[in-house]
Amino acid sequence: MNAPVIVAGAGPAGLMIAAELRIAGVPVTVLEKLPERTGESRGLGFTSRTMEVFDQRGILPRFGDIETSDQGHFGGIPVNFGVLEGALQAAKTVPQSTTEAILEGWARELGADIRRGHELLAVDDDGDGVTVTVRGPEGEERLRAEWLVGCDGGRSAVRKAAGFDFPGTAATMEMFLADLRGVELEPRMIGENLPGGMVMVGPLPDGVTRIIVCERGTPPQRRTGPPPFQEVADAWKRLTGVDISHAEPVWVSAFGDATRQVTEYRRGRVILAGDSAHIHLPAGGQGMNASIQDAVNLGWKLAATVTGTAPEGLLDTYHAERHAVGKRLLMNTQAQGLLFLSGAEVQPLRDVLGELVQYEDVSRHLAAMVSGLEITYEVGGGSHPLLGKRLPGLPLRTPDGKAVRSSEALHRGRGVLFDLADNPRLRSRAAPWTDRIDVLTAAPDGPLPSELDGTAALLVRPDGYIAWAAPGAHGDLPMALERWFGPGRA
């Protein structure tokens, strides 16, 4: 074996998976077709859940001062995301190029072998491992691994070579994205519907302005490269009456509204994550964020499988959990597309939804959907309201008086048992698993979410989701530990 795991693609999903595997001590090789990062930024900013994920791994400070906001939208309808109590606010202006640079630096520091200029040509899964044929700077070579993870985008070579089914709907329209210098435009942060289509304008760092143009009735084109900027400028002028042809284009791209999802996220020893597994309209900036969360869900499970500590069926939960999330992602982006991109016939629906979001429960529901905070995994029955949900950031204080936040306990990428009531018997019962989980004894140090009233203990998976709680979970702690982390030591 050249490595236990080969990852195809050095975008956000591939780099995040590589880092997660290295945190767990698993060697990983990342193959990337491009010889260097492009600097292009389809994704922009982070949802609240991705902010939490980066905080739980201790890498959020690497992004420096991040501009955040509690204002968002659903299909162009303004939504107050400030109703999401206990959540980090979303980041608005971090380019994907910055995210990729930081994730790559982190993965390399952890020891990931990242090989640029290596294009995957063929995949052979023989049941005992996967052999890939790769064209690199030295010519073609064959590499072998126990597992192959495809994170190589919407046109995934891994997905095609491994024979995954990818049903859905083809694009029905074409939209333009352009990053420009030397132009001043009125901000349209959540987009504006005009008689002929939709336009969006937002500022980026370093004096760059991003525009998105969707002209209704424009069929998708088969392109071999980016559209000429003049084509974008002409569409902008037809919609807005403003001439931007004098601007300097930094980057121009075209995209469509195709919506597809693989029927299975794993086939044998080949696994897909991110855009390789699902493509959709980039509404609400959810694509990159969902890809990163795919990676965090998969990383610890694959690492446990490779190291031999995974309980039976653990890796199967990746598909069970994330396929359902992806299906719902496609649903909400399609709904947003109808609101965003349709004509006057949809205005009554926009008006009704605009009234509904004035109700806090409606805003909370839509904000949680777009932010990734609504996700609930099946972890076993019980009455505790946070079972299967993500752990919010909690202020805690250890018995020796040290102030900590719950996110700090997850920096090592291991499961964590939060002993909130200083219970020696609880810690004793967890002792056979302390080679795989950490135990933190700490009391709440300030107000906690109402859902945690009376909570004495929480078992949190490495991806930050609550797998067991006391009181309120069916089954005892050892049962939950064995389900997620395998048999304890004798």
Image: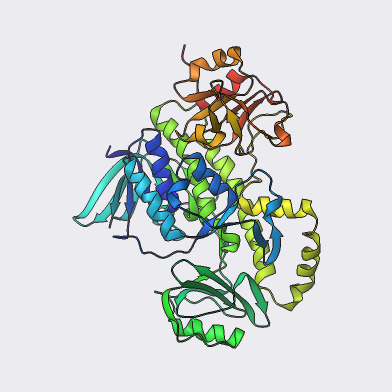
Q: Is residue 359 left or right of residue 447?
A: right
The quarter of the picture where residue 148 lies is: top left
Q: Is residue 283 above or below residue 399?
A: below
Residue toward you, 363 or 196: 363
Residue toward you, 129 or 437: 437
- Measuring 61% from the left and 84% from the top, which residue is drawn there? 239
Q: Is residue 356 visible?
A: yes
Provide residue 121's location: percent of width, then percent of height.
Answer: 32, 56
| Quadrant (top left, top right, bottom left, bottom right) of the N terminus | top left
The quarter of the picture where residue 459 lies is: top right
Q: Is residue 379 above or below residue 251?
A: above
- Measuring 77% from the left and 63% from the top, which residue is drawn there? 353
Task: Identify the residue at the far left of this view.
Answer: 138
Looking at the image, what colour scheme do you see? Answer: rainbow
Task: Identify the residue at the far front of this view.
Answer: 401
Provide residue 24's location: percent of width, then percent of height.
Answer: 40, 33
Residue toward you, 458 or 175: 458
Q: Is residue 272 visible?
A: no
Q: Is residue 456 above or below residue 90?
A: above
Q: Is residue 269 left or right of residue 112?
A: right
Query: Number of labelled discs?
Result: 0
Provide residue 454's location: percent of width, then percent of height.
Answer: 72, 26
- Measuring 70% from the left and 60% from the top, which residue is drawn there? 79
Provide residue 270's location: percent of width, then percent of height.
Answer: 42, 44
